[in-house]
Each structure stands twice: as structure tokens, then as C-alpha cells.
Amino acid sequence: WSPDGSWLVSANSTPLLLWDMETQTVAKTIPANDHRSFAWAQDGDLIAIGTDRYIEILDSSSLEQIRQLDASVLLGGAGGMLAQNKSLAFSQDGNEIVSGGNQGSVTFWDVEKGQHVVGESLHTSDVVDVEWTSNGEYVVSLDAHSRVNVWSAEKKEVLTSFEAASGFPLTLSWSPDGTKLAMTSSDEAIPTNPTLTVFDVDSWQPLYHTQTGMDKVSW
């Protein structure tokens, strides 16, 4: 969703589709090859699309590319492993992006300069989701082994790390006030009856745990 709720992006194959929710029709298409993730800046002005090698920054009005971040350089350059930017999130002010991808990589980017600020591989498996709190204080990254790293967004350092679930992790979502973190996971590679777990941010202990049948969660 766009921050104001007027637009919705859907993805299955190239291109991405931008829906006008007032008319409930496809208003625009966004060409994107090998897209793996998508994020909207909180002010609605910028869109980020994660591909195998790059993070493309687009103006949301014109859909023109204004910047391209080369994530492949962090994994050996153009001849190295594909970054596969599987998840993206903007900071609250839109000045930074965090990306998660192959080899446990979590990277913080300066959007204006088009450069990475910090790139770390502190996970032991591919990062499947990253999320920024609405107050800008924390970032969480989730890997394919259900390991969650909680980052200080300011210092770009991991504050704590814990195993959130057994099985296959799916998605994360912060509560609007940043005091709780919701996660869906499944005991099967192809989820049939996923589990929802809600964690308390102060203790990082589960407050709520139940099977829901939902593989995605959004607060």
C-alpha cells in the first residue's frame, strides 16, 4: 500500500501493477526485471524495487528511475553471487533503506548518495524480511532459519538476537507504536497452516502464539 492508502502495488511477474484504489483499476505499470521486493517511502514520494543485483529508486509520480543502488558489489561484484534483494524497508524520513538478501546480508543505504552505509552478514542463511519501526529506533532482520536480529537504526549495530520459531519463517510486521513485533511461520516449506507469534519488544518473549492459516501479516 501507498502511505495514504490510495494506491496498491501487486506483483506476480513482470511488470508490477499499480492500482488506483478509488477506481479499482490498474493505473500504471512498472517495468521491473527479476523483481523480488518492493517498498514505499513513508511520504509517498519514492518507490524502491529490489532485483537480483540492484535496488532501483523511482519517483512515485512519474515512475522514472532516479537512482540505482548496486547491491552486487557487496557480494563480489558483477561476477559474484547475485544479491537477491528479498526484502526492503525505508526509514521513517525516507533518507535510508535497509535491504536483506543472500548470504545473510543486511545492508543500510544512503538514498541520496546512492551508497551503502553499512553492509553486514550476521545471519547464517538468506535474509527473508527486514522491517523498520515507525519511530525509527529499531530495524529487525529475519533469516531463513528463523533467526531475528534486532538492530539499532542509529548505530547500525545488532542489539540482540534470538530464534523466533521453528520451521520456515514467512513475514514480520511491527505494531504502529513499535512495542510489539508480529511474525508468521510454518512447519512446512509450502505453508498450509501457518502460525502467528507476537513478541514483546522489551523482553523479546512471545505474548501470543496461535495457528491462523495466514502466511502474511500486516499491522
Image (cartoon, rainbow, N blue to C red):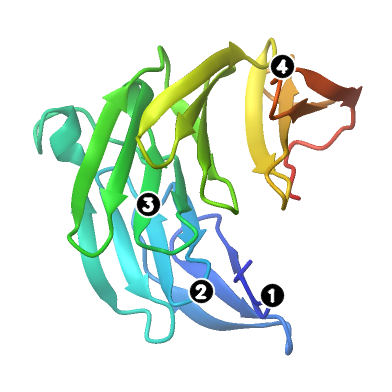
Up/down of 19 relative to 173, above or below: below
Q: Residue 97, labelled with which disc?
A: 3
Where is residue 145 drawn, in percent x and y? 55, 13
Q: Is mark 3 on a helix, strand or loop?
A: strand
Q: Which amino acid does label 2 sit on?
A: Asp
Left or right: 44 in relation to 196: left
Upstream in sequence: badge 4 or badge 1: 1
Closer to us: 59 or 208: 208
| Circle 2 SS class | loop
Q: Name the residue under label 2.
A: 43
- Where's residue 105, x and y in %? 33, 28
The answer to whether marks 3 and 1 mark residues whose Cβ atoms lie closer than 8 Å is: no
Q: In this view, does 112 lie above or below 152?
A: below
Identify which amino acid the numbered label 4 is placed on: Glu
Q: Can you tell which quarter of the image residue 208 is in?
A: top right
Label 4 belongs to which residue?
188
Q: How many marks?
A: 4
The nearer-to-camera label among 4 and 1 is 1
**Mark 1 highlights which residue?**
5
Q: Which of marks 4 and 2 is nearer the N terminus?
A: 2
- Identity of the residue drawn at 35% across and 61% down: 95
In the displayed structure image, the side of residue 135 where residue 214 appears, left or right = right
Give the distance between the C-alpha atoms of the residues marked 3 and 1, in whole angstroms.
Answer: 21 Å
Q: Real-space Cα distance between discs 4 and 2?
A: 37 Å
Element under disc 4: loop
Determine contact: label 2, label 3, CB under 8 Å: no
Label 3, residues with CA under 10 Å away: few <14, some 14-19, many ≥20 = many
Q: How far apart are marks 4 and 1 (CA)?
A: 33 Å
